[in-house]
Amino acid sequence: MGRPIHKLTDREAQKFAGGRSRKLHGDGGGLYLGVAPPNGASWVFRYTDRRGTARTMGLGAYAGARDDGRGLSLERARERALELRKLIRDGGDPMEKRAQDKLEKRQKRERMETFKDCAAACIKIRAQNLKNKKHIAQWSSTLETFAFPIMGELAVADVTRDHVEQVLKPIWATKHETATRVRQRIEAVLDYAAAKRLREGENPARWDGALKNLLGGRPRSAKVQHQPALPYVQIGAFMADLRQREGNGALALQFAILTAARPGEVTGATWGEINLETKTWSIPEGRMKKERAHRVPLSDAAVAVLETVRKLAPVVDGKPDPLAIVFPGMDGKSAMSDATMNTVCKKMGYREDLSGTPGKVVVPHGFRASFRSWGEATTDTPFEVLEAALSHAKKGKEVTAYARDDLLDRRRPVMDLWGKACTAGLEEAA
């Protein structure tokens, strides 16, 4: 009579594992080596549960004579089968125990991962693609201010739509733009958590669906807040005053106005991006808002500003060091803060808010709107040329794919005209 258990030998198991037909080879005690070509062989355990139902439970792949960490050897499979037989004798059910262990493991992991934990991990990953430290800080500060007090210490798996609504509702009407960004960032964190298998089901911060119905669209009271801009008819007087100001901040602001560039594009400019011979400023995609390289034609007025700061630039082979910052900060080396140009405006008597004397409200970014209004009102420059000058994204993927010409040659005349408009009367004012 054969033995009731341990019927197989290592040699037999290896031979059966290489078989070409589907078959179960019993080792006894409920342990079987299942062969299923072409997927190989694996161990299964068969038993009858408390309700008298036959159950088959997979134990893992067959690993040959030695357990290599990717499967079970005959010896290790027998040890596992012995553990399961003991569990059954004690009144347990192997498959129910496995399901319970899996659930407890997942719940333990979820309890360890709070929304705040996931937000930190999500921000760390996104920081690799965000443009600068300011954007990273905005992610952290908005979540810390609005989301963390409500859901920061919650297990990320337990965050519900009620929590999201509790965060957004108090600021939906009064700080709508901020609320919109907070919602987007909560959604991103929860999507990250789902990708890490820390939560299941629909993302409760997703806009389409219940959340849209709960909060509604943009409140009428939440008007779009455009950047405060100077009327273009005042640009000549503003520039005359600005030219009397000392320091790199004033020069950087002049250059930003003359090129209709974003403040951050100006403060981060290096001499390697400037070609004074072709009168072109080439900004790499890594420094652009839309991650597309952008070329700016330089007017005589813009070149004049560069010639002024060039005198103080470090020199390599008779030319400005290509790695040197064009408009350095106080230390003369690193880029100045974006706030420096704001400070210049404030010293000139202009504010960022809409209170007080009309016409005395402006921020550096707003001069892009001044340029846009001037171009539409005083020139016959086509819409697409003005948009290209501002490096605005073309609408639609197909348009972006086919309209690859940056219209540099067509933009030169309008930038020259803008330069003359900005500097008109400067000699008389000097």
Image (cartoon, rainbow, N blue to C red):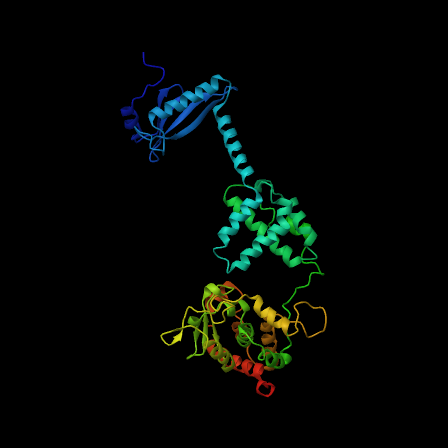
Q: Is residue 130 above or below residue 359?
A: above
The x and y percentages for residue 186 are: 59, 50
Q: In this view, does 356 lie above or below 73?
A: below
**Quarter in which the C terminus is drawn:** bottom right
Query: Residue 379: in sight, yes or no?
Result: no
Residue in front for this viewpoint, 285 or 338: 338
Query: Residue 167: in sight, yes or no?
Result: yes
Residue in front for this viewpoint, 167 or 309: 309
The x and y percentages for residue 354 are: 69, 68
Residue in the image at 64% along x and 76% along y? 231
The x and y percentages for residue 141 are: 59, 54
The x and y percentages for residue 2 are: 32, 14
Residue in front for this viewpoint, 383 or 344: 344
256 sits to left or right of 354: left
Residue in the image at 72% along x and 68% along y? 355
Q: In this view, does 121 lie above or below 33?
A: below
79 sits to left or right of 342: left
**Quarter in which the N terminus is drawn:** top left
Residue in the image at 41% along x and 28% along y? 59
Q: In which quarter of the image is residue 260?
A: bottom right
